[in-house]
């Protein structure tokens, strides 16, 4: 499956090896980080943070992650301009994940674009159909 088909297709192709890849490729200890729109409650993106990413997020007041594929700090929006302004950070009960409550400071949070070129609000733009194997675009816009 091509990268294009993965991001824009309707065939379910979940990567159940993701955490194994994170463990084997990432040179840092990381935990999951969820970015949630503070206004709508929608989950925008899920990534990973290490200590540096969390410290940077608190200092810069912007959602910051650790890129497990590039092994580098990633301030969301630094390249695209679609920053996620950090309103608060929540920690789960077992202290093994964080929730960034954010406010969109750009037009979207996902690196993918709609067919008209506009950014998608968040990364969860498709839903699983009841057949359990096919995806459909949530907003009807590919």
Image (tube, rainbow, N blue to C red):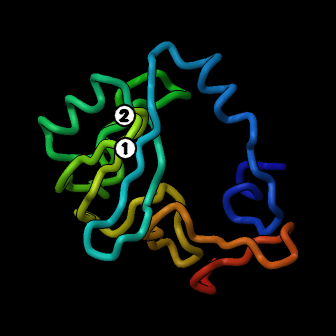
Looking at the rendered structure, the secondary structure element under dot 1 is loop
Instruction: Choose top left, top right, bottom left or bottom right for residue 69.
Output: top right
Q: Determine the residue positioned at 45% across, 25% down.
A: 30
Whole-angstrom CA distance, mark 2 to mark 1, is 5 Å
Q: Determine whether 140 is above or below 136 in the image.
A: below
Q: Determine whether 93 is above or below 106 in the image.
A: above
Q: Are marks 2 and 1 in contact (CB under 8 Å)?
A: yes
Instruction: Choose top left, top right, bottom left or bottom right for residue 35.
Output: bottom left
In the rendered structure, find residue 95 and report the number of the disc placed on it.
2
Q: Determine whether 90 is above or below 118 in the image.
A: above
Mark 2 surroundings: few (<14), some (14-19) or many (≥20) residues within 10 A: few
> Residue under circle 1?
92
Residue most extreme to the top:
27
**Image side of residue 53 versus residue 18, left or right:** left
Looking at the rendered structure, the secondary structure element under dot 2 is loop
Q: Determine the residue positioned at 27% across, 23% down.
A: 52
In the rendered structure, find residue 43 and report the number of the disc placed on it.
none
Residue most extreme to the bottom:
140
Instruction: Choose top left, top right, bottom left or bottom right for residue 83.
Output: bottom left
Q: Determine the residue positioned at 69% across, 26% down.
A: 20
Mark 1 surroundings: few (<14), some (14-19) or many (≥20) residues within 10 A: few
**Image side of residue 139 versus residue 121, left or right:** right
Q: Position of residue 134 (x, y in %)?
A: 83, 71
In front here: 79 or 135?
135
Q: Position of residue 49 (x, y in %)?
A: 38, 32
């Amino acid at each position: 499956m091509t990268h294009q088909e993965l991001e824009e297709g309707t065939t379910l192709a979940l990567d159940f090896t993701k955490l194994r890849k994170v463990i084997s490729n990432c040179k840092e200890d990381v935990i999951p980080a969820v970015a949630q729109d503070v206004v709508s409650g929608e989950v925008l993106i899920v990534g990973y943070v290490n200590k540096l990413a969390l410290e940077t997020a608190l200092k810069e007041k912007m959602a910051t992650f650790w890129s497990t594929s590039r092994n580098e700090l990633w301030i969301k929006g630094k390249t695209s301009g679609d920053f996620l302004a950090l309103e608060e950070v929540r920690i789960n009960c077992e202290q093994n994940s964080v929730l960034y409550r954010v406010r969109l400071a750009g037009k979207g949070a996902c690196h993918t674009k709609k067919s008209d070129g506009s950014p998608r609000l968040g990364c969860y733009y498709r839903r699983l159909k009841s057949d359990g194997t096919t995806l459909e675009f949530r907003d009807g816009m590919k």
